[in-house]
Image (cartoon, rainbow, N blue to C red):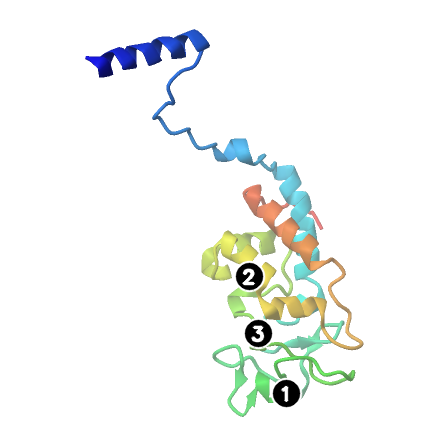
Amino acid sequence: MKALTRSLALATLAGFLGCSEPSSEPEAAPTPAATKASVGEDEGRRAYATVFQVLTHPRCLNCHPAGQRPLQFDTSQPHAMNVQRGSDDRGRPGLRCTACHSAGNHDQPHLPPGSPDWRLAPLEQAFEGRSPEALAAQLKDPKRSHMSLDELVAHVRDDALVGWGWAPGPERAAVPVSREEFVAAFETWTEAGAPLPKEGAK
């Protein structure tokens, strides 16, 4: 009886003070739309222009050739000594990429550049000769890119060989867009749904 009387008294006091008992219902989690503003297609297309600029720079393009030979120099010439991609994109037997390319750059110019696991990209991931529309469609296709869009973002953000493009060694032109700006543009493009550029865009 005393316990019942005490409960009634506490309830009356709480009502008088304008308080209420804590709700046992958990608060609803914010929806993605409430936490992150959506990115429009036009903004995504503008961001993709930066993505395309970087991917078609010689530092990226040379390792993404459309044929069986790597490209080299700022002019994207076929690799000297008839170097070929081989069955695993790391060179043919007897002339593997790592025969000349070590895990890091040399301090002196005119020597082979280096980065961990130096290799070509798979042929399905070729950038050479691709129009903006064709390259965007290729990136969106996991059968050709071998990655989801989220995985591509992580790849361009974290992969050491990708990062070499911004630190290519003496007397080689680095990618002119910062890696941070490039990754941000790639993220914006994917958040917009990876829209294809309008026909004729450059």
Name which of mark 2 and mark 1 comes first in the sequence.
1
The residue lying at 49 percent from left, 61 percent from top is: 144
Q: Position of residue 117 (x, y in %)?
A: 56, 77
Pair 2/1: label in front: 2
Left or right of 35 in this view: 59: right
Q: Position of residue 114 (x, y in %)?
A: 65, 79
Q: Nearer the viewer, residue 81 or 161?
A: 161
The residue lying at 39 percent from left, 9 percent from top is: 15
Pair 3/1: label in front: 1
- According to the picture, the residue beneath numbered tag 3 turns out to be 120
**Separation of residues labelled 3 and 1 (CA atoms):** 14 Å
The residue lying at 48 percent from left, 59 percent from top is: 147
Picture layout, residue 41 above or below residue 87: above
**In the image, which disc is placed on residue 155?**
2
Q: Amino acid at mark 3?
A: Leu
Q: Amino acid at mark 2?
A: His
